[in-house]
Amino acid sequence: MKVAVYPGSFDPVTLGHLDIIERSARLCDLLYVGVLVNPQKRDALFAWEERVQMLHDATAHLQNVHCECFQGLLATYASQRQAAAIVRGLRAVSDFEYEFKLAAANRHLAPHIETVFMMTSHEYSFLSSSIVKEVAQLGGRVQGWVPEGVAERLADRFLPSGGAGR
Ligand code: PNS
C-alpha cells in the first residue's frame, strides 16, 4: 500500500491546498493530511482542531484521505505513518528555495522518504492562506478561494455581524 503525507499549516485550507490533495490522493492508496501543531507559533488564526475540522469537511468526498495533526519533526511523523512520499505544492519560483531546503533536511532525516512536488493549478498560483486571511480581514470576498465552510468561519471571525448578509 502506497502511503503519502501532505503536511502544512493549513491556516486555513484553501482551494489551492484542496487541488493538491485531490490530485495527490489519486496517486496513492492513502494520503494523510497533517496539520502542524506548533505551540511556539501563537499567531495562528485558527486553532489546530478547527484547521483539522475544516480539512475534514473539505475532503469528505475523498475516501482515501485522512486529516489529522502532528507535532515535532515532519520526517518523524512521515516515518511513523510509513509514508513513501511527502507531498508539497509549488506555486511559483519564490517557493523553490524554502522547499528545496525543507526537502533536503527531510531527506537527511529520513532518506527512505521522497519529497514529491506538485505544481499548483494555474488558477491558484497566487493563492495562499495569508492572502485569504488578509483579504477576509479587510472585508474582501474569499469565495472561490476557500471551501464554503471556511468562508463562513472567516466571516464569523472578521465580519461584525458574523457574516449576515454575505
Ligand atoms: O504550510 P507550511 O507552513 O508551508 O508548512 C510547513 C511545514 C509544516 C511543512 C514545515 O514547517 C514542517 O515540516 N514543520 C515541522 C518541523 C520540521 O520537520 N522541521 C524540519 C524541517 S526544516
Image: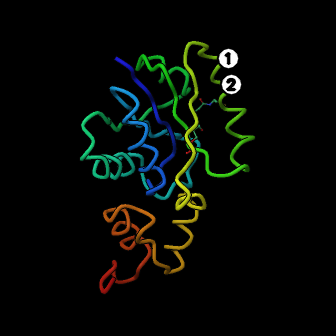
Farthest residue, direction top: 112
Does 161 sit above or below residue 102?
A: below
Determine contact: label 2, label 1, CB under 8 Å: yes
Q: Residue 143: which quarter of the image?
A: bottom left
* Residue named by callout 1: 108
Q: How many marks?
A: 2
Residue in the foreground of this view, choosing between 152 and 126: 126
Q: Residue 73 has which mark?
A: none
Task: Report the amino acid beneath label 2.
Answer: Ala
Which residue occupies 67% across, 38% down?
99
Which residue occupies 56% across, 58% down?
122
Image quarter for ligand 1 equals top right
* Residue named by callout 2: 105
Farthest residue, direction bottom: 165
Which residue occupies 28% across, 51% down?
57
Q: Tell me where residue 145 appears, x and y as whole percent.
A: 45, 65
For the N terminus, which image quadrant? Answer: top left
Q: Residue 142: which quarter of the image?
A: bottom left
Q: How crowded is mark 1: few (under 14 residues within 10 Å), some or many (20 or more)?
A: few
Residue in the foreground of this view, choosing between 66 and 53: 66
Per the image, label 2 sits on a secondary structure element best described as helix
Task: Report the amino acid beneath label 1.
Answer: His
Left or right: residue 105 compared with residue 151:
right
Q: Does the residue labelled 2 lie within 8 Å of ligand 1?
A: yes
For the C terminus, which image quadrant? Answer: bottom left
Q: Tell me where residue 31 appears, x and y as whole percent.
A: 37, 31
